[in-house]
Amino acid sequence: MKEPARHHGLWNAIKNRTLPSAMSSKMGTQSAQQIAFLRSLNKGLRRPETLHIQLKELKTAVFDLETTGFHPKQGDEILSFGAVKVEGAAVRADEGHHSLSRISKPLPEEIIMLTGITQEMADQAPPLVEALHGFMSFVEDRVLIAHCSGHDKAFLDLALWKTSKVQLSHRVLDTMMIAQRLHSGSQIASLDDWLGYYGIPVTRRHNALEDAKMTAHLWIALVDQLREKGVNTLGDLYVYLSHS
């Protein structure tokens, strides 16, 4: 992939601040570029003007991670990334992103059964920095959306810190939190249940890309319902959620 302007910026980052030349040499040119890109992407996010954008016009990336467990700080790792772009009420499903990520420990049998990802597939996957670079290149500077986003954000934060010494700076919205706010008192939490509530077909669960696509359709349904309550912009949504 040829992106001269971006590569020029990456090398400036490497030379000026992000990576000592000795580290760049040790890790290799490609890894050095990937790390520098991950660092540079986080600059300039959370622009105040984004708060005034209508939700129906907001450019978002809905994502999901499959992981080896629930505890990133205790050694659980990202197994796969999935994401799809949404613009307004349109899910750009034909441009989705899906990639596996190599892990450092044996894959638990229950995760193999749940995701269909085998140990051989995990062993042949690209290293974390490469998979992370591909994912972040796809989502760009869009507002990120996930279901039960705290789980995914914790893994992304740790992965970014381990590979690039940065943390996630994107705005992140949680479809579970929004749905529960719209239906105060509801005990529904799981993605399956909310998909059923809004009549969204379940395709394939525990596949990062398919889960991202279904969550994207849930997000669109939530935006329609939010508009009925006078919640029109991203700023409105933050205020609405703060009153829960």
Image (spheres, helix red, strand yellow):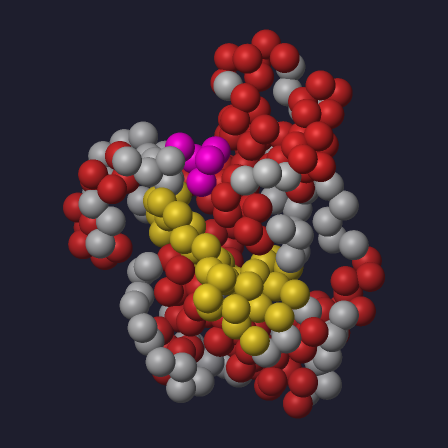
55 horizontally vs 201: left or right: right
Please tell me whether residue 83 is drawn above or below residue 177 in the rendered image.
above
In the rendered image, residue 12 lying in the magenta stretch gets the answer no
Measured from the top left, where is residue 154 in percent x and y? 50, 46
Coordinates of residue 87 in the picture (x, y in percent):
62, 70
Side (left or right) of 239 relative to 187: right
Q: Is residue 209 visible?
A: yes
Relative to 48, say whether 190 is above or below: below
Q: Residue at x 36, y 45 (%)?
A: 100
Q: Is residue 229 left or right of residue 190?
A: right
Q: In the depicted view, which residue is nearer to us: 134 or 178? A: 134
- Where residue 172 appears, x then y in whole percent? 60, 57
Q: Quadrant of the C terminus?
A: bottom right
Q: Residue at x 52, y 68 (%)?
A: 92
Q: Is residue 128 magenta?
A: yes
Q: Position of residue 222 (x, y in %)?
A: 56, 79
Per the picture, the main secondary structure of the magenta-coloured stretch is: helix
Q: Identify the image quadrant of the N terminus.
A: top right
Q: Residue furthest top?
A: 22
Nearer to us in this view, 95 or 159:
95
Vertical placement of residue 138 versus 126, above or below: below
Magenta segment boundaries in residue numbering: 127-131
